Image: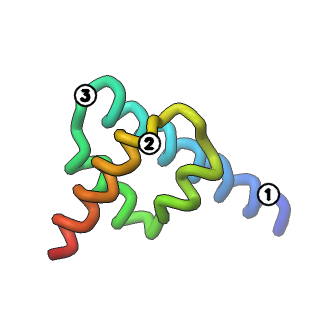
Amino acid sequence: MNSISNGAKELNLKEQIHQIIYLIKHRNDYSNAAKLMLENDLSIEALRKRTLKLSQLEIAKLADSIYESKG
């Protein structure tokens, strides 16, 4: 049961990361990508560990959006 639970959490995390990448790459929507990260308590570091699809500039813009939405 625990491995199923962990597998479901990992799948959900992958889906969240996919959604964040989609928002940034296809919609240029950093605000909603930041909101999704904050709602799911996902760090920039966790995102960077799980994908290479975002450039440093995109990561920086996302970090700025996260910072702005917290302020």
Name the residue beneath numbered marker 3: 27
Which residue shows up at 58% across the image and 52% down it? Answer: 13
Q: Which quadrant holds the C terminus?
A: bottom left
Which residue is outermost to the front? 56
Earlier in the chain: of badge 1 and badge 3, it is: 1
Q: Which mark is residue 56?
A: 2
- Alpha carbon distance from label 3 to label 2: 18 Å
Q: Residues within 10 Å of mark 2 (few under 14, many from 20)?
A: few
- Alpha carbon distance from label 1 to label 2: 34 Å
Observer-nearest of 6 and 14? 14
Q: Quadrant of residue 6?
A: bottom right
Residue 15 image offset from top left, x and y in percent = 53, 42
Earlier in the chain: of badge 1 and badge 2, it is: 1
Residue type, label 2: Gln
Which residue shows up at 21% across the image and 73% down it? Answer: 70
Residue type, label 1: Ile
